[in-house]
Amino acid sequence: MITLHRLNGEEMTLNAELILTVEAMPDTHILMMDRRRVLVSETVDEVVRAVVEYRRRVMSGALLAPSVPLSA
């Protein structure tokens, strides 16, 4: 999950795994998998950085998690 801001300044949390595209038109539009569009005050670069940081945290947690044997 990433935290972004609506154009009115209201904070929102968005599931980064459900983002399809991020475009500047000139406001930043995020197209979600369910085809909803979300407008945010962050730039495209800021959204990308937030998603990359989110994925970095997820992957580092996965690497630190103990191995679980697969059951037959």
Image (cartoon, rainbow, N blue to C red):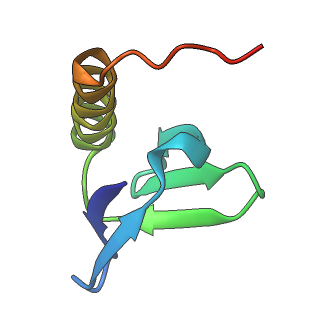
Q: Is residue 22 above or below residue 15?
A: above
Query: Taking 72 as reference, is 17 left or right?
Result: left
**Residue 58 drawn at (x, y percent):** 32, 32
Q: Quadrant of residue 12?
A: bottom left
- The residue drawn where x is 28% and y is 63% is 4
**Residue 27 drawn at (x, y percent):** 39, 58
**Residue 34 drawn at (x, y percent):** 77, 58
Kindly give the residue lying farthest to the front in the view shown.
72
- The residue drawn where x is 50% and y is 54% is 29
- The residue drawn where x is 48% and y is 55% is 15
Q: Which one is in front, 57 or 53?
A: 57
Q: Is residue 32 above or below residue 17?
A: below
- The residue drawn where x is 26% and y is 62% is 3
Query: Taking 11 as reference, is 18 left or right?
Result: right
Q: Quadrant of the N terminus?
A: bottom left
Q: Which one is in front, 6 or 53?
A: 53
Query: Taking 71 as reference, is 8 left or right?
Result: left
Q: Quadrant of residue 19?
A: top right
Q: Is residue 48 above or below residue 2?
A: above
Q: Which one is in front, 65 or 48?
A: 65
Q: Quadrant of the C terminus?
A: top right
**Residue 38 drawn at (x, y percent):** 53, 65
How many numbered tags mark residues here?
A: 0
